[in-house]
Structures are given as structure tokens and as C-alpha cells.
Image (spheres, rainbow, N blue to C red):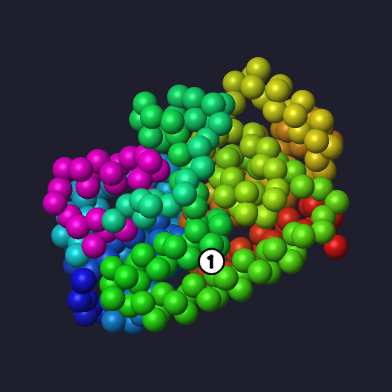
């Protein structure tokens, strides 16, 4: 177990420049930083390695970031090539680290989703976006709680997540539509949990745009589903979603994959729960739920 006693730092405001190498816990990106801060309480410093407004897939590490990772008492991250720069730094150091995807039931990407992408190397790609399923996020919270010997705090967070899961189950139980058209394949776990069908315009990585032929196929698939909404994200250009929406005469709306908060979201006090509830409201409207 790890006994830590350093000053607290807000996970939503962590960046590559706001902390030195004295961070006790280094969390790879926002969802892990949020869980670590909630579980560890106000006695532990938590450093979010991904700055606000930065897409975590694209994270590059400065020399200072690498030193922060190397000197950390604990690094929390997701494997499967989600943040290759961080995994490279961990591979070349002795920093104590936990891959929070270990022991989780992971979904495989489709052939189209992971073709040419870095997730999993030559092995079949596995979807790392587990935090968008509140119940898998429970497992992450409890794993962090066990590692930090903060099981009671982890249990409190888990209860909130189970309540959120009930909100989603009730809110999405009776809907006119079940298809979920998203700009990239981040919502597979959410779709699986709540009996939705994800139709992704691109693969597991948000910047991996489809070829013209693949785009034609996606447009045809969206048209066949009769989808009325194409969702785009906060940290990625909406251009692809807007193009498909025009082709099928659908509207666009925001569905946040919670890979990070923008500075504006931090300023207005947004967190995992408020963003997930905003996602639920957007889904209910798009899917015409009663």
C-alpha cells in the first residue's frame, strides 16, 4: 500500500506546466485524475498529466513531464496504446504504475475502427474508453481505493456511479431510436451498457478520419438507420460530423467523451458527473426518449 501525505491539487486544473516533479500521484488524463482525487481525498497531491483542452490521444511529454512520471509515487494510466508517449516513458523507467485496463472486460474494435491504428500494436485493438460506462468506472475507482488503502472513499464514489448508472438505465429505457452516431468510436461501452448501437464515423482515435470510400459507406449506414442526429465532441474538430449530417439531412449535437475538460468547463465547475448528465440529456433528446 502507498502512504501519501502531500498537499492537494485539483485534478481538473493539472497541466504540463503547473507542477514540478513532486507529484505523489500522476494520472494520465482527466477521468483517472478525477477518480484519484475523489478517492485519495485532501491529503494527496494528484497531478493530471494532460493539460485542459488537450486531446489525450495526442499527448506529448516534455522533459519535465517525463521527470514527473519517473519521480511519481504512483502513475495511473490506461494501456492499449491509448497514450503511447506515456507508455514509452513508463517502459523506460522504474516508476510504479498501474494499467487500469488490466482485469477489465474490454471490447474489441471493429476491423474498420482499428485498421492502421496504434492501439494494441499487432494484436487486435481493444477499446480503452471504459470510463464512459459508469459500472466499469466503478471497477477503476475500487482498484484505486485498494491501491491507496482508501476503500471507504472508493465505496462512496462507487455508490454515486451506481446511482448515475440507474439514471442512464431509466432515461434510455424507452426511446424511439437506439442508434448513436458519433464522430469517433468512443462510446462502445456506453452503447453496450444501455442497449444502444454505436455508428462511428471514424475509429478509436478521434483524428483517424475515414477515406472517401469509407466516408461514403458511413453516410449510407447512417442514412439506412434513419438517424436524425450526428454527435461531435468538444476537443475535436466537428468538420467530419457536420459533413455527414449535411449528407443525411440530420442535425448535429455535442456528446462529450470526457477525455478531458476544456478551460471553460473547468471555470464553470463541470466534472465527470455533470458532463455525463449533460450527455444523458443530449441522448434523450436525440433518441426521442420518453
Residue 135 inside the magenta-drawn segment: no
Q: Is residue 233 above or below residue 136?
A: above
Q: Is residue 262 visible?
A: no
Q: Where does the magenta region start and end?
A: 74-97
Q: Is residue 6 visible?
A: yes
Q: Residue 100, located in which quarter of the rendered image?
A: bottom left
Identified at 36% across, 51% down, the residue is 102
Q: Is residue 8 left or right of residue 214?
A: left
| Residue found farthest to the left | 94
Identified at 59% across, 33% down, the residue is 202
Q: Is residue 85 above or below residue 217?
A: below
Asked which secondary structure carries label 1, the reply is helix
The residue tagged 1 is 272
Q: Nearer the viewer, residue 34 or 22?
A: 34
Residue 92 inside the magenta-drawn segment: yes
| Residue found farthest to the top | 213
Identified at 24% across, 56% down, the residue is 97
The x, y position of residue 145, in whole percent, is 35, 72
Amino acid at each position: 500500500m502507498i502512504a501519501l501525505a502531500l498537499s492537494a491539487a485539483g485534478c481538473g486544473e493539472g497541466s504540463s506546466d503547473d507542477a514540478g516533479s513532486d507529484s505523489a500521484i500522476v494520472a494520465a488524463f482527466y477521468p483517472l485524475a478525477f477518480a484519484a482525487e475523489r478517492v485519495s481525498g485532501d491529503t494527496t497531491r494528484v497531478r493530471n498529466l494532460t493539460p485542459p483542452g488537450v486531446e489525450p490521444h495526442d499527448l506529448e511529454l516534455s522533459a519535465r513531464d517525463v521527470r514527473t512520471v519517473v519521480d511519481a509515487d504512483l502513475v495511473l494510466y490506461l494501456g492499449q496504446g491509448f497514450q503511447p508517449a506515456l507508455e514509452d516513458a513508463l517502459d523506460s523507467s522504474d516508476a510504479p504504475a498501474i494499467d487500469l485496463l488490466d482485469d477489465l472486460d474490454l471490447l474489441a474494435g471493429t476491423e474498420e475502427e482499428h485498421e492502421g491504428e496504434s492501439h494494441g500494436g499487432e494484436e487486435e485493438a481493444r477499446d480503452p474508453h471504459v470510463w464512459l460506462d459508469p459500472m466499469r468506472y466503478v471497477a477503476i475507482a475500487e482498484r484505486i481505493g485498494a491501491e491507496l488503502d482508501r476503500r471507504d472513499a472508493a465505496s462512496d464514489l462507487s455508490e454515486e456511479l451506481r446511482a448515475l448508472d440507474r439514471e442512464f438505465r431509466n432515461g434510455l429505457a424507452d426511446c424511439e431510436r437506439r442508434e448513436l452516431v458519433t464522430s469517433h468510436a468512443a462510446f462502445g461501452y456506453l452503447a453496450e451498457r444501455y442497449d444502444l448501437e454505436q455508428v462511428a464515423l471514424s475509429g478509436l482515435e478521434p483524428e483517424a478520419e475515414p477515406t472517401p470510400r469509407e466516408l461514403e459507406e458511413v453516410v449510407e449506414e447512417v442514412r439506412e438507420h434513419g438517424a436524425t442526429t450526428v454527435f461531435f465532441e468538444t476537443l475535436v474538430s466537428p468538420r467530419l460530423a457536420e459533413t455527414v449530417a449535411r449528407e443525411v439531412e440530420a442535425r448535429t449535437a455535442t456528446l462529450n467523451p470526457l477525455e478531458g475538460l476544456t478551460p471553460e468547463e473547468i471555470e464553470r465547475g463541470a466534472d465527470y458527473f455533470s458532463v455525463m448528465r449533460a450527455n444523458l440529456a443530449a441522448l434523450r433528446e436525440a433518441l426521442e426518449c420518453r
